[in-house]
Image (cartoon, grey):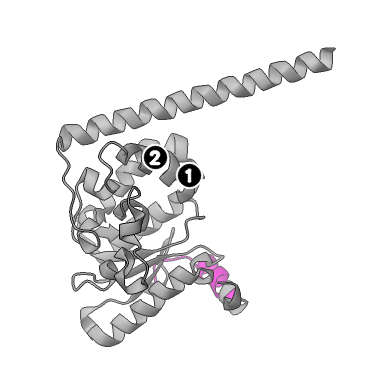
Amino acid sequence: QDTAIGLVLGAMAVCLRRRSFVSTISRRRKEMRKLILADRPNPQPCPRGPARAISIGKLVDFDDFFQAHIRDRSMYYVNSNLISPLTEPEKMSYAELVGASSVDFFVSHYWGHQFRLLTESLRRHAKHWRADDQWKDTTYWICSFSNNQWNLKEELPGDCDESSFYIALRDAGCKGTAMVLDEKAEPLQRSWCLFELLQTFRLSQERGEDFNGLSLCTASGVLNGGGTGVDIAMGIAQRLATLDLQFA
């Protein structure tokens, strides 16, 4: 009997914590929308693709605002619990909601990574390319923030070369690709990331010095820019040595 009572009380405690967490994140989303709409009371849609980039400053602000909820979670959590609910009333992309910009860099990444890895890697990349205090204005095309999650059929109409990914990366204003990596080099095992990598290499050949090519971005700096630690570089090198692309 005591065991049964203990189980019931334990289940009730879990349920109460869960309800408290849900109400807290809901309140936090409302606070964020209030801040956004105070600055942009009438958000306007813009064409899909390169016009829907988001500045690293706005991405860092988003991460800081929701960090107590995001913690070590991935983009899957962020998209379902934050981006989609925040954009539901307007049915537009998050970039459009907060004010989209023309793309500086295209981002290739793995949704299963911790969201903090994405934010910190791009923050360091922005500082690598812009040593002045204007680094927060550097803009990135990130699929979850730049695509309209309420109209993915338009973003991904069928053919790869008609997708918003392809249009953004191939835009003349795009300076290069920022690929976010950890020691496991997960993006290099994803077919869509490999497609983005192929397009990046092709653009490097087509545009020459007008295109900065591929930046390998980590939480400690840009790997091929000399800004990351030896341990990270060695970990990625070891992973690449055993990478099997047949499972991509």
Q: Earlier in the sequence, mark 2 or mark 1?
A: 1
Please name the residue shown 22% across and 63% down the image. Answer: 50
Q: Which residue is mark 2?
A: 82
Please name the residue shown 23% across and 62% down the image. Answer: 131
Q: Are marks 2 and 1 in contact (CB under 8 Å)?
A: yes
Residue 103 in view, yes or no? no
Vertical order, 144 against 237 (above or below): above
Q: Is residue 163 magenta?
A: no
- On screen, residue 182 versus residue 144, left or right, reads right
- On screen, residue 69 versus residue 101, left or right, reads right
The quadrant in which residue 217 appears is bottom left
Residue 74, how many percent across, how many down?
49, 49
Q: Which quadrant is the N terminus positioned in? A: top right
Q: Which quadrant is the C terminus positioned in? A: bottom right
Badge 1 crowding class, 10 Å Cα cut-off, few under 14, some 14 to 19, many 20 or more, is: some
Vertical order, 4 against 76 (above or below): above
Please name the residue shown 52% across and 55% down the image. Answer: 112
Residue 103, how many percent across, how many down?
22, 63
Residue 153: which numbered mark, if any?
none
Residue 39, how many percent across, how many down?
16, 36
Q: Nearer the viewer, residue 131 or 70?
A: 70
User: In terms of secondary structure, where does tag 2 sit?
Assistant: helix
Q: Which residue is mark 1?
A: 77
The quadrant in which residue 33 appears is top left
Task: Name the kind of residue labelled 2 in the image.
Answer: Leu
Image: magenta residue range: 226-238
